[in-house]
Amino acid sequence: MGSPAVCGVMSEMCVGATARSALALGFRTVLPHDAHATYDIPAAPGIADEVPAAMASRVAEWALGDEVEIVARAADVLFTAPGAGGGCG
């Protein structure tokens, strides 16, 4: 395997955990901004207002630090067939 492109739902949970696992295993990890999402975080009365899903997803990207490669669109990721070499990126 070359470089995994991590996509999915629950940016701050499943997507983040998968990206961190790939990084821990030494993979160059790609996270297409338009290929992960989450839900609005409900307001916590007396503590915080609702957090829109788009903001929660962006914060999840930022929380991964500078090791993950964030690209704007999944369409910008080059995929190669297994055994063809090159990975994605």
Image: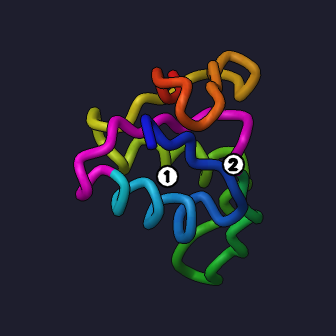
Which region of the structure is painted magenta? 23-36
Secondary structure under the numbered disc 2 in the rendered image: strand
Check disc 1 and give the amino acid type.
Ala
Secondary structure under the numbered disc 1 in the rendered image: helix
Pick the front one: 10 or 8 = 8
Check disc 2 and give the amino acid type.
His
> Please, is residue 45 above or below residue 38 in the view?
below
> Please, is residue 68 above or below residue 20 in the view?
above
Q: Residue furthest bottom?
A: 45
Residue at 28% x, 33% y is 66
- Camera-nearest label, 2 or 1: 2
Q: Which mark is residue 36?
A: 2
Residue at 24% x, 57% y is 24
The answer to the question of whether label 2 and label 1 lie on touching residues, with beta carbons closer than 8 A, is yes
Residue topped by disc 1: 60
Tell me residue 55's x, y (percent).
63, 46
Residue at 51% x, 22% y is 89
Does residue 70 show up magenta in the picture? no
